[in-house]
Amino acid sequence: MKTTVERYTGDEAKVSVWASSMFGLTGETVEEIPHSTSWYTATVDLRWQQRGGWQASELQTSDGPEPSSQR
C-alpha cells in the first residue's frame, strides 16, 4: 500500500491510496472460486471537523496501476 497527499490546505486534504485486493473461495460446501488479485487507486477528499477530526467527504476509485515486474 502506498499513500500520497495530493493536496493539503489546513482543513481540507486529498489523499490517494494505492493498494491491492485478493479474493477467492474454497471449501467443502461451496463452489470453488479461484483467487484473483486486483490493483486500484482510491482517492479520498477529507475535511477537518472540529468535533470528530478528519472525515471523508468524497471517495473515488480507479483500476491500477499494476506494479511492474521489471527492476
Image (spheres, rainbow, N blue to C red):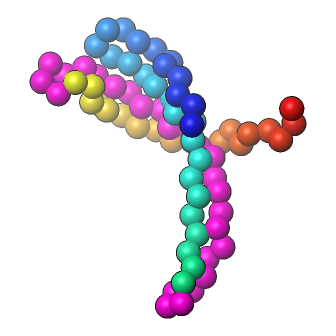
The residue nearer to you, when weighing 46 against 21, is 21
Q: Which residues are magenta?
A: 28-52
Position of 65 compared to 20: left or right?
right
Please tell me which residue is depicted at 68% across the width and 39% down the height of the picture: 65
Q: Residue at x 50, y 37 (%)?
A: 42
Quadrant in the picture for residue 10: top left
Placement of 67 over or under 54, stated as above or below:
below
Dividing the image into 4 quarters, which one contains the N terminus? top right
Q: In which quadrant of the rendered view does residue 44 lie?
A: top left
- Image location (x, y in percent) of residue 46: 34, 25
| Quadrant of the rendering where the C terminus is positioned | top right
As displayed, is residue 6 above or below residue 36?
above
State yes or no: residue 41 in magenta: yes
Let me know if residue 43 is in the magenta part: yes
| Residue drawn at 83 percent across, 41 percent down | 69
Q: Position of residue 26 (x, y in %)?
A: 57, 79
**Residue name at image x 14 percent, y 19 percent:** 50
In the figure, is residue 10 to the left or right of 51? right
Q: Specify the farthest residue to the right.
A: 70
Tally of numbered discs: 0
Q: Is residue 55 left or right of residue 6?
A: left
Viewer-proximal residue among 10 and 30:
30
Tell me if 44 is positioned left or right of 17 in this view. Answer: left
In the image, farthest residue toward the left: 51
Secondary structure mainly formed by the magenta segment: strand
Q: Is residue 47 depicted above or below 23 in this figure?
A: above
